[in-house]
Structure formats: C-alpha cells, structure tokens
Image (cartoon, rainbow, N blue to C red):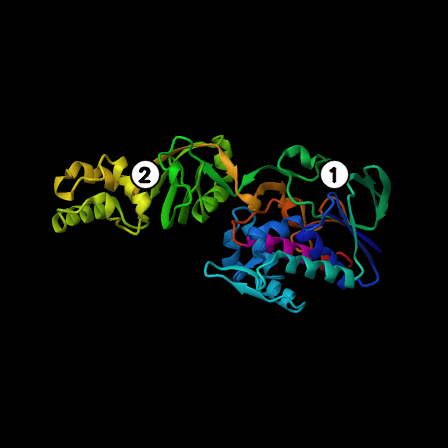
Amino acid sequence: MHIAIIGGGAAGFMAAITAAESSPGSKVTILEKSGKVLSKVRISGGGRCNVTHQPSSPGHFAKNYPRGEKFLKSILSVFSADDTVRWFESRGVRLKTEPDGRMFPATDSSDTIIHCLMESARKKGVEVRTGVSVVSFEKTGDQFRLEIHNSPPVITDRLVIATGGFPKLQGFDWLAEHRHDIVPPVPSLFTFNTPGSYLLPLAGISVQYARIRIHNTQLKSEGPILITHWGFSGPAVLRLSAWGARELAGLNYQFQVRINWTGDTNFDQVREGLYDLKSAFPKQQLATHAQFNIPARLWRALVENAGITGHLRLADTQHKSLNKLAMSLTDSVFDVSGKTTFKEEFVTCGGISLDSIDPETLESKSMQGLFFAGEVLDVDGITGGFNFQHAWSSGYIVGRGIGL
C-alpha cells in the first residue's frame, strides 16, 4: 500500500512516521511544496522549538484551544502531551519545562527536534520529496491521482492532507471541490497596533500581570503585556487575539482596548492607595517613586499623562489629578487600528470543518481513504506549544489508523 502525505511539517512527519510503524509493509511518502521540510519547527520559539505544553488532563489541556476544544479533548485522550514527551524521550530527546509551562528540548535548539523527526522517518523508510507542488487530486476506484506541477502524477492508495492553514479562503478551493465544508480562515495570534499611543516610545517594557479587555465586547484576558514599537503584545494580548479572532476580524481590527496595569487592584483601591501615599510622603515626587509593581518608565509616563509633572511633590498634587492617575492605572484606554503578525507563531483560525471528518480516525466523511492532520483543520490553540501538540496528536491518530 502506498500512503502519500501532502505537507512536510510537524503533523505530516508524525503521521508519516506513525503510519510506517503501524503499517510496516507500506510505502510512505511525504510531498512538500517548498524546498525545506519542518520550517515552522525550525523557527518556533525563537529557534528553540516550543514542542508542547506541560501535560495535564485532556479536559484541562483542551481549554487552551479557542476552536476545537471538544475535538482536542477526544484526540488528547489517545495521544496527549505526556505521550509527546515520552515519544521524543524514547528517541533520545529530553524535554524541559519552563516556569510558564512551555516545553522545549533540553538543548534549546529546534535542530534537535528536526534531527529526531528526520532520523525517525529515515529509519522507518519514509521517502521525503521536496519541491513537489500538488495542484489537485481525484479519486478513481480505490486510488488517488495527484496532479503535480511540472512533474508526473503520483498514484497513491491513501492520502493525508497536512498542508497547514491557508490565509485566504481560495487556498482551500482544491479541497472544497471534494465536498468538504470550509470554515473561512482569519488570522489568530496577532499583536495590536496603537499608532496614536503615547506609550510607543517605551517599546520593550513589560508588565508581568495586567488585565486587558476589548471595549463593548465580552473579550478579556490577563497576564504579561509587552509594549512594542507599534502597540501591545505579550501573552495576554496574544490570548485575547486568539479567543477574539473572528470577532476582531469582524471589527476590521478597529476597536478600543482597556488595560488595568495593576492587575487585580480596582479604581477605589488604587485611589485610596494614592491618597495614603500623599499623606505619608508629602515631600515625595510621585513621578520618581513607582507603585503597584509598575516599571519606573511606564509609571512616569502614566503619571505625566494624568497631568502630574515630574517635579511636583505629592503635597502639591490635587486629588483630582490623583483620581485621574488612578483611572489611568486601572482603566487606560487605547485605540487599536490594525494588527501585526506575531513572529513565527502566526496561525489561522478556520479550515476544514470538524463536521467533515470522523473524529476517531480523522478520515474524510465524504471520501474514503482521505485523512486530515494539523492546522488545515478548523482547530487552533493559544501560544505556548498548544498548536504543535495538536499537530503531534492529530498526526499520530491519522498514522495509527490509516493502514487499517
């Protein structure tokens, strides 16, 4: 039996290796459009490769997927983050866990993961072909005929689509024509552009725990926020972009964010804290004594934005100004106009509808012998190793069942 896998990424390699192990008499071929395989693995995590996230129960782990939580809960019960750790360690790759739960190879190099996958595929006899662009496919009898750009067609008995997501709906046309429902793609995991923000000169400063929400929506998040040259980034912003991917696309990325830089402290508590500070230290210059765990430069900018000059002593600062500062600290408002892709973590929300596939095998309901794995499905996770875990899990399930 010949098994062809379109896409040489994480999901494609896991599917290929597992298929070769599960069906040892089969010929397994990876067809990759570009000149290199595993390119997203190479650049992930700044070249370190964020392989997965600290293992937890399938139900808890699946809550990190804005689209596909129920689906992930199911496939994680078959191949979990624990299984990913064991899979790599059994092949000589030890993973380490960082304080935020992200897991990387102990070498801090994505080359370690790439070498492991390439070597595992080689040992199992998987053929890897690069520069092979599949234009279309059709099924005749029990076989698939793949039309290849500027090359002879490929005939195969089983076909796996592991191409990753497509940024535009037209990218899915070759799959939609085979009666698969496509959920229109929109970006997920992006940063917010605030071109009019007075904080832009503070690029590089981060607050370790803040709360952020989108005005006039139910969307909110918490955690670290990073000020950038173009606006806001950091885990709290990226999570917000993931959960709000469709809603924010509907707003054409024009909206207001409201930030509580103090985290869990509310306006009344901050105001009273500032009043107490004035009583206790009347000779202090407020701008030079940061409070509420706010970085010094950000504190100074917030103080000055409240109309309190740098040399002004607390004794000379009116309560009206302290009230305004308390509002800036707990409910700063910024106009967002546009988004920026977050480095290599860019993923799409959308793809092959989960209603189009068998959740146990990931086989197409409309075409026997056709399987899907990875980001081509309408599944996406927040940043932190969750999208790679989906790739490993879905690739494993496809590879395990494809030869049956």
Instruction: Tell me the amino acid under the disc marked 2.
Output: Ser
Where is residue 115? Give x, y as percent: 69, 59
Where is residue 132? Give x, y as percent: 79, 43
Of the two numbered discs 2 and 1 on the same chain, state the one appearing first in sequence.
1
Question: Is residue 379 located in the magenta-colored stretch of the structure?
Answer: no
Q: Secondary structure at mark 2?
A: strand
Question: Is residue 392 located in the magenta-colored stretch of the structure?
Answer: yes
The residue wearing badge 1 is 178
Taking the image as drawn, is residue 71 in sight?
no
Write the start and end of the magenta stretch as one range: 385-398
The residue wearing badge 2 is 332
Report the residue at 42% width, 45% height from top: 204
Disc 2: CA contacts within 10 A as few (<14), some (14-19) or many (>=20): some
Where is residue 69? Give x, y as percent: 54, 51
Which secondary structure is most common in the magenta stretch?
helix
Left or right of residue 38: residue 311: left
Q: Quadrant of the C terminus?
A: bottom right
Left or right of residue 29: residue 315: left
